[in-house]
Image (tube, rainbow, N blue to C red):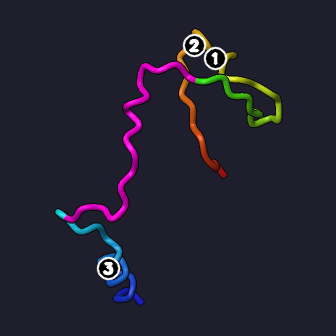
Amino acid sequence: MAGMAILSTVSFSQQPGRQPSVQFPQVTQLVGKQLPDIKVLDSQGNPMSTSDLRGRHTVLVFGCLT
């Protein structure tokens, strides 16, 4: 059983010097651009928009956080 765990760890580890097979778009080109007004629901189901955040330091996270 311990041998299987060691083998699976080695086989799924990242190989150094190898380029990733997936290229992700550069997002830094959006730094300094104005955020469009988007209306969404917060974690309690209350409506909010990005214009509510204007003038505040904010970190936006998009995706499933469950």
Which amino acid, by three-letter code, is at mark 3? Ser
Q: Earlier in the sequence, mark 3 or mark 1?
A: 3
On the image, which quarter does residue 14 sit in? Answer: bottom left
Percent coordinates x, y for residue 18 in the rendering: 21, 65
Q: Residues within 10 Å of mark 1 (few under 14, many from 20)?
A: few
Q: Which residue is mark 3?
A: 11
Q: Is residue 3 left or right of residue 55?
A: left
Which amino acid, by three-letter code, is at mark 1? Leu
Magenta stretch: residue 40 in it?
no
Q: Which residue is mark 1?
A: 53
Secondary structure, mark 2, is: loop
On the image, which quarter does residue 15 sit in? Answer: bottom left
The residue nearer to you, when weighing 17 against 25, is 25
For the point 42% across and 90% down, the residue is 1
On the image, which quarter does residue 40 sit in? Answer: top right
The circle drawn on residue 56 is: 2
Q: Are marks 2 and 1 in contact (CB under 8 Å)?
A: yes
Range of magenta residues: 18-35
Foreground disc of the pair 3, 1 = 1
